[in-house]
Image: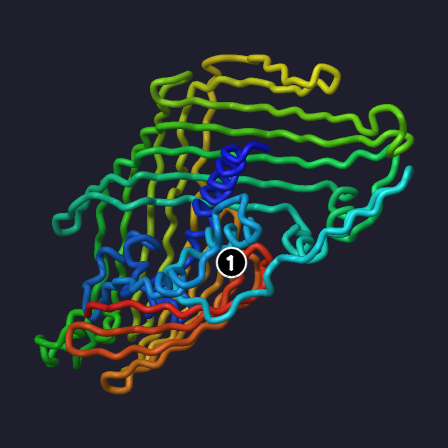
Amino acid sequence: MPNHCRRVAVVCVVAAAFATSAQAQMLDARRLGMGGVATSDNGASRTANVAFRAVPAGRGTHSIPLPIGLIQYANDHPTFDTDDPDFNIFKILDLASNPPLTLSLSKPDEVSGDISIFVARDSLSVDLDDVRRAIPEEAWKMGGVYHLMAIGFGVKNFFVQVVPTIHVRNEFDLDDPLRRALRDAEPFTGNTRYGTSDEGVAQAAVAWQAGMTLRPLYRLPADANEGDQDDPSADDPRRNGATAFYMGAAPKYYWGLAYGSVRGQGGITTGDTLFGSGDPVAIDMTALTRHAAIGQDGGSGHGFGADVGGVFFYKNLELGVGVNDLGSEIDWKTTVKQHVYSDSLNEFTTTTLGKDIDFTSRIPAALTVNVAKRMGSMMVAADFVDTELKTMVHLGVERWLGMLAIRGGAYRDANGRWQATGGTGLRFGGIGVDLAVATHSRNVEEERAAELCASLTLY
């Protein structure tokens, strides 16, 4: 393969990984130290539950990440030169999964080692050594819904905003014979098909959103009316013991910019003799694609959806339920094509099956349920987050000892593994410095590693 083609391939792989896995990296050290839990007064307050917007700020915080990992990256980074003998695609994939914004404290063993190939007339086996750790045991699923930086403003209980939105989903799988041959070094056999399948969708839209939040219920305890009204906790239902209920709803109109999907499969079928005089394998590949884009076939799409939520407070106990992208759908005029590879002609044949075909895409909803209990200088919190591809749980605790905060937590990640976190913070008036140490499995090997995160916090 020419050098420029290899470099382009590397860039494409990195871009795909960055667009998905990188989103899992949390840069708010206070929240990470508490297991990444979402509450109404941390970094999740504007994204997890629209009703959080109505809750008074009280002692809410704002986090500013400190990219301490860039120093480490400057001293030790992988080579992107495919001609360099130290080039390792797995290092680049790990870098894409873990942008150098946090400090790596430990890493999984590097995917390396010699690949052994054993060949005979009717036998072929491939031992990938360490590389087999990078081959998933099940279908490889990646993606999510990403709401990019919102632009808008609010007046009292009303707000409007524009939110660029991207939805990406891809599922790649190996059939059982190919997986066993690659993961277990099982010999390839004659008259056997070794195949892969891939199903992916990507869509981009701009959401124009108008929302309203309400407080239909608010009742202070009897002794709270005599409290110090200069205390920020006096009007804060998280800490003043009040009974309060807040709710919010924000309908949105989607202007679809582009949509594309592919469903395909491919494979090779071995002959009677693996290395006979004729062609040893037959190749098959088919794919069905559907697309539409502004300024091209089908033009733009149009649709509607909404974010809804509620949060209830009782004696400093918080319970919130938020649903983002509820019922979100976009209507398109799509072009559908079929692509079939001819082994005899060594080329693809593309057939247009239809143009301006009505199609409705869906932006998957995300459910967040959170609970938190504040007891003086201590807070205990948990949440449950369910999305299209993953279900996660976060648990956290925070205790303030004067100017010093001690934090701990755990979370169940997208791969179903439990990870541990811990951290501390030091506050000087309205500004603080926070550190967090956490384990994770955001790497090609899906093995546990550890990182250090730092951020400034504005109180």
- Residue 426 x %, y %: 26, 79
- Residue 356 x %, y %: 45, 14
Residue at the location (33% across, 48% down)?
308
Quarter of the rendering containing residue 427: bottom left
Residue at the location (19% across, 45% down)?
159
Instruction: Kindly give the residue lying farthest to the bottom in the view shown.
Output: 401
Rendered position, 197 above or below 118: above
> Would residue 333 be seen by someone viewing this image from the given angle?
yes
Quarter of the rendering containing residue 305: top left
Q: Camera-side residue: 326 or 1? A: 1
Left or right: residue 45 compared with residue 348: left
- Residue 109 x %, y %: 60, 65
**Quarter the C terminus occupies:** bottom left
Question: Badge 1: few (under 14), some or many (20 or more) residues near its Cα, within 10 Å?
Answer: many
Q: Camera-side residue: 388 or 3? A: 3
Rendered position, 7 above or below 285: below
Which colour style is shown?
rainbow
The residue to which callout 1 is attached is 442
- Residue 180 x %, y %: 77, 48
Residue at the location (51% across, 41% down)?
10
Left or right: residue 82 compared with residue 403: right
Rendered position, 443 above or below 148: below
Q: Camera-side residue: 111 or 435? A: 111
Residue at the location (28% across, 86% down)?
401
> Would residue 386 be seen by someone viewing this image from the given angle?
no
Left or right: residue 266 compared with residue 99: right
User: What amino acid is found at the position of numbered circle 1 in the picture?
Assistant: Arg
